Amino acid sequence: MPARVVSVTPLDRNISETKVFGPMFEEQLATWGWHAEHHRPGMKASGRWVTAVSANGKGWPDYFCTHEATGDCFVAELKVRYDKPSPEQVQWLAILARCGIEVHVWWPPDWPEMVQRLAAPRRLITPAVYAGM
């Protein structure tokens, strides 16, 4: 993949909305050829925001990111302000790390590191071609 110049604007912890930080991250994922999975929360009739999950899904990281051309993958939990991962999120990140999955918890000031990670996917495997069913 040819190198691309991306304008990186340092961000600060004053970004208080995931609805701003998440789309910025998703734009960079697309720019650098990544595929990602992300569950968006929905509002219940009570006005409470929830993300529908089942089994042990509570605390699953915000993004599961894969790079088709290289076989690279990682998970990312995005936080704003001074938020910290919940106990369930910490548990999932630890489990995934033990399974060999690279894990990140990123805040807005980590923006340059995030872009650098996305811009340089690692060749981990020779990708297999999925032929379908």
Image: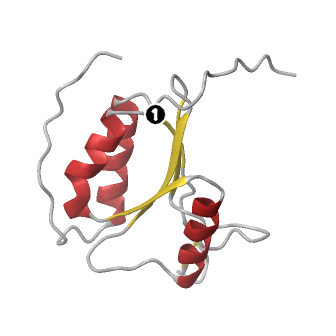
Determine crowd level at label 1: few under 14, some 14-19, many 20+ residues with C-alpha closer than 10 A: many
Name the residue at 34% across, 48% down.
Answer: 25
Furthest residue to the right? 133
Towards the viewer: 26 or 92: 92
Examine the rendered structure and indicate whether residue 15 appears above or below residue 88: above
Closer to the camera in the image, 70 or 26: 70
Quarter of the image for residue 6 reads top left
Q: Observer-nearest residue: 125 or 40?
A: 125
Identify the colour scheme used.
secondary structure
Residue 22 screen position, x and y as percent: 37, 55
Quarter occupied by the N terminus: top left
Nearer to the camera, 64 or 124:
124
Q: Is residue 123 above or below residue 53?
A: above
Q: Amino acid at mark 1?
A: Trp
**Residue for point 25% across, 21% down:** 3
Apparent side of residue 24 relative to residue 51 in the rendered image (left or right): left
Whether residue 31 is visible to the viewer of this picture, yes or no, is yes
Direction from residue 45 to residue 117 in the image, left or right: left
Task: Identify the residue position indicated by label 1 in the image.
Answer: 34
Q: Is residue 51 visible?
A: no
Relative image position of residue 5 (x, y in whole percent): 17, 27
| Local SS, label 1 | loop
Taking the spot 20% from the left edge, 49% from the top edge, the residue there is: 112
Q: Say left or right for 131 vs 129.
A: right
Question: Can you say which quadrant of the picture contains the C terminus?
Answer: top right
Relative vertical location of residue 125 with respect to residue 113 in this rendering, above or below = above
Residue 54: x %, y % from top left: 76, 68
- Horizontal arrangement in the rendering, residue 114 relative to residue 30 (left or right): left
Residue 57 image offset from top left, x and y in percent: 69, 68
